[in-house]
Image (cartoon, coloured by chain):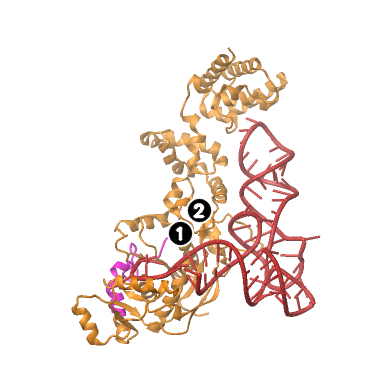
Chain colours: A orange, B red
Amino acid sequence: MDNTPVRVRIAPSPTGNCHVGTARTALYNYLFAKQHNGSFILRVDDTDIRRNTPESEQGVFDGLKWIGLTWDEGPDVGGPCGLYRQSERLDIYLQYAQQLLAQDLAYECFCTPQELEVERKEQTARKEDPRYSGKCANLTPEEREERRQQGLKPSLRLRVRKGAVAFEDIVRGHVEQDAALMGDFVIIKSNGIPVYNYATVIDDHDMAISHVIRAAEHISNTFPQVLIYEAFGWEMPHFAHLVLMLNPDKTKISKRKGAVYLGEFAELGYLPEALLNFCAFLGWNPGGEDTQELLSLDELQERFSLERCTHSNAVFDTVKLDWMNGMWIRRLAAEELTPRVLPFIIKAGHLTPQEAATPEATAYLTALLNLIHERLPRLDAAPEILAYFYQDWQLSEVDTTSILANKSNHTPEEILRVLQLAYELISHEPFAAHHLEEVFKQQAVALGWKLGDLLMPLRVAITNRKVSPPLFTTMELLNQERVLARLSLAMAGVKEAMA
RNA sequence: GGCCCCAUAGUGAAGCGGUCUAACACACCAGCCUUUCACGCUGGCGACACGGGUUCGAAUCCCGUUGGGGUCACCA
């Protein structure tokens, strides 16, 4: 083992929102850095000028923060490397390129995109692999000057050597490719902007990155990058390529086939803790006897290792994510859940933002969440589950069919009588969940009814649905007045149905 | 198509040459618990892609086939 300090990085493009894949890669980098007392660096890959807007990097930062990750160096927090946006580092790339040019390890290429396009087409027609022919590889100074006179702006290409290009991948082992497949590739475009593979190498070297941990789609980028390291005579970082996240149809995870941005997951009611936990297990697991899968960031930090990363791509299974999300919801106290659920309640129109700001409203929500948080798979389900606490309904909306339906063949008359009885009891008995529960249990015995048969019509009458949290606590939270009102509404509905 | 990577149940996966009549988790099914739902508990279903080697012995090593994925730009 060497003593080089561990420095890892994540280099997202500022697309306005953080992709789950980016989050997972960031997580692994973060865990690795923390474990080795190293630094986790955030660098913004914004050389694609057409695509990037200044504010779009904030979305990426926000996403990473939402999921709980922080970085030691980056454009927003600074650090010893100074500039953490590639767009700010253009001079650096050009300077290094001069070095290559001076040593004749790179050369100017005056071919136009059109010419290259034609060349590629011809090669493909001949069933050859398209690669640069090397047309400009040996231009004389005079020839170059001539082209310059014509107004042509050169790009810079690396002279690609012969032989195998290889690297040792921490998760995959030895990987190699024949350099002959490559052709001299562009490192600086004719507009002076560096190409991704080149800028990445310069930055990684400049920032003393020790381990490049990234998604497997970058394996093929690694070959040209290796060549660039060689050209400069720089020591390479260690590489680790992580398996891809897949759609259920096994293609690379994509927007059209489900949520991919952290913002989308937030809107769907996923907890960042759960998403993080889930992502951690796509492409890695602690192995052996350690089968615990519900792990916090700190717990992941104790167990993570690059060596235990898996080799084959993993389908992003939202069913399991939902399960994990439910587990994380249960881990939180109702009080902690309240502020997270409130936005969903407001969005559903159950509360106005002003109402939601009152202590009464939040306290009430907390009480409701206490009741349902064991049966809440996602935050966004809360408004629907809690709807009958926030809104009433009309006579025409009473679900009389469900009130009357029962497996024991109790007649509508009997059901109606039970509803009337319930009305009487609830009006006169002390209005407390425990007490009412006892009272109704006794009644069931007295009537010779199964408790479930007795309670189901009441449940539907009071909540207007067949599924609810335990009935008596529900009543208590609803308050006596509303319960009685709903009971009479239900009775009216039943009478109407019987007529 | 070239190149690269990968291949255990529907999904995530353990397994690192014998202890594998192959774990665990999600999903699914059945039962228990129960006031409906959910939770929880018990049990069940279900896999080493195929074919050759190597070896006393292979899910584990090698080769091939098939399948899947990634990537092939003056995009990142």
Q: Which residue is mark 1?
A: A23
Residue B47: % across, % down:
69, 59
Q: Are marks 1 and 2 in contact (CB under 8 Å)?
A: yes
Q: Which residues are magenta?
A: A68-97
Q: CA distance from mark 1 to mark 2?
A: 10 Å
**Quadrant housing residue A110:** bottom left
Residue at the location (38% across, 57% down)? A60
Residue A426: % across, % down:
58, 20
Chain of residue at mark 2: A
Q: Nearer the viewer, residue A96 or A130?
A: A130
- Residue A177 can be seen in this image: yes
Instruction: Determine the residue located farthest toward the left in the rendered image.
Output: A149
Q: Nearer the viewer, residue A110 or A284?
A: A110
- The residue type indicated by label 1 comes to Ala
Instruction: Work out which quarter of the rendered image holds the C terminus of chain A and state it.
Output: top right
Label 2 Cα neighbours within 10 Å, binned few <14 / some 14-19 / many ≥20: many
Residue at the location (38% across, 37% down)? A357
Residue A275 got which mark? 2
Residue B70: % across, % down:
48, 65
